[in-house]
Amino acid sequence: MKKKHKLGCLFGSGISIKANYLNVNDITKVILEGKFEKNGASLKAYHHTDQETYLVQQNFTEYMNDHYLERVLPFINNVYLCLKDYFNAKQYICTPNYEDLYNFIRQIKDEISKEQDNYGLFCSLPILKEKLISDIITENYLVDRISNNLLSISNDSLIYITNIVQRLLNKQNDKSEWNYLSILNDLIKKNMSTIFTLNHDTLLEQYFDENGIEYCDGFSEKDGDTFHFKEESFNMSTTINLIKLHGSVNWFILEDEKGRATYSKPLTNDYHHIESSNGNYFYKSGYTNQMLVGSFNKLTDYNFGIFDTLFSEFTIRLREIQVLIISGYSFGDKGVNGKLKYWFNEDQNRKIIIIHPNKDDLLRRCRGMIFWMLDNESKKTEDNRRINIIEKKFEDLLIEDIDSILNKINKDCQLD
């Protein structure tokens, strides 16, 4: 019988900051402004005729459609102002970010398109429409998908946000940027077999590839210039399972010459020229890659396509774990939080180790159910506590910090 795995990790975007990835606030700034300074060069958002938005040098205008951004950018900024008023009224300690923008715009789109009823939003739509799009210039627009209505602008804005997030997080790292990830080697030696990550970037994959660490992300079937997703590969894996719950910057839906679609991970960044093993070309379906953006909308999105499979794997693999190390995650995902709470309460031998530089800040930011979990645990004696917080950044973490907690765990919960 296969040995039961005991140790796992859950990572959020905080672990990637040290590797020079933008944080959520910096990404939000680029989305709102439609421009980005990188290595001394000024990049600007341009909407291509392929219906995707790119970040290119300011003087590059060939085949670009600025009418799209002339309506999308003002709309997104108007949404931001609405959210800012809401955050101020709720006395939140943070400002809206691109995840909040996406979630609100998604609610508008889903209500208007009848995908999901939203009674409160429906009652306020006339006011919202006046507030969000009344000041957007409507002259000289073609009468096509760029029509000036709330549904069209909402849909285009969601694509724009996803495109920009993908462009900003899709980068190759210098080896010197990931030295701090060497602690993963120590955790693997301690029988860590599964990493759940909410990150869209490929930092972990690059580190594993460079250091010869085998892992399975579900994309196991090679076909020419790409790998196709096969959910059964997680069951066959004897390596590290890397479960990317929110997708990735390099995942797409590809269609072959017969129109058959599959989730794929191309080996090239030239996503419009991906050759299959039989010499034919795949065609990228849709205008975005496969990753979840937003906040509460993810509760719905976890039920469809590849994300349904990944969330199911999350449930299955989580049950195999007795000690879960969490870092870079501020507990803002209600779907993930719900799974964690059920897993934690299901077995009193299960433990959580949280890596976060400021415990008080974590408590202020995390959502309700996790807040009460942490609050209840903090009232217990140290010997009875099942959630331990190491107040460090992930890049400053030492394996000795983990060992000092693991050594206190009773024998029933010791790692194999």
Image (tube, grey):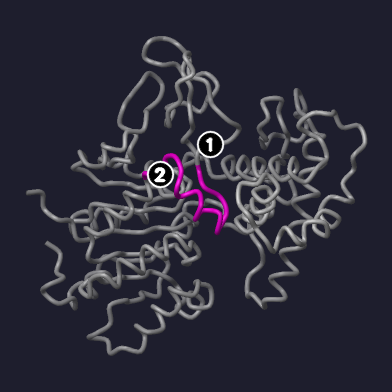
Find out whether residue 283 is within the magenta segment: no
Numbered tag placed on residue 161 in the rendering:
none
Q: Quadrant of the C terminus?
A: bottom left
Q: Is residue 248 left or right of residue 34?
A: left
Q: Residue pushed farthest right?
A: 139
In this view, the mark in front (2 or 1)? 1
Q: Look at mark 2 in the image and give the residue it sits on.
A: 175
The amino acid type found where label 1 is placed reads Asn
State the extent of the magenta-drawn residues as a range.
Answer: 291-309
Q: Whole-percent x and y of residue 247?
A: 45, 44
Nearest the viewer among 170 and 10 is 10
Find out whether residue 294 is within the magenta segment: yes
Q: Whole-percent x and y of residue 87?
A: 69, 71
Q: Is residue 93 left or right of residue 359?
A: right
In the rendered structure, are the residues bearing label 2 and label 1 in contact, judged by CB atoms less than 8 Å apart?
no
What secondary structure is marked by label 2?
helix
What secondary structure is marked by label 1?
loop
Q: Residue at point 66% right, 32% down?
A: 52
Dot 1 alpha-carbon crowd within 10 angstroms: few under 14, some 14 to 19, many 20 or more? many
The amino acid type found where label 2 is placed reads Lys
Q: Residue at point 31% right, 55% down?
A: 315
Q: Whole-percent x and y of residue 338?
A: 41, 65
Numbered tag placed on residue 289 in the rendering:
1
Q: Is residue 330 left or right of residue 227?
A: right
Nearest the viewer among 103 and 252 is 103
Sequence-first disc among 2 and 1:
2
Question: Residue 146's quadrant in the figure?
Answer: top right
Q: Is residue 171 above or below residue 411?
A: above
Q: Is residue 100 left or right of residue 189?
A: right
Dot 2 alpha-carbon crowd within 10 angstroms: few under 14, some 14 to 19, many 20 or more? few
Q: Residue pushed farthest top?
A: 279
Q: Residue at point 82% right, 53% down?
A: 129
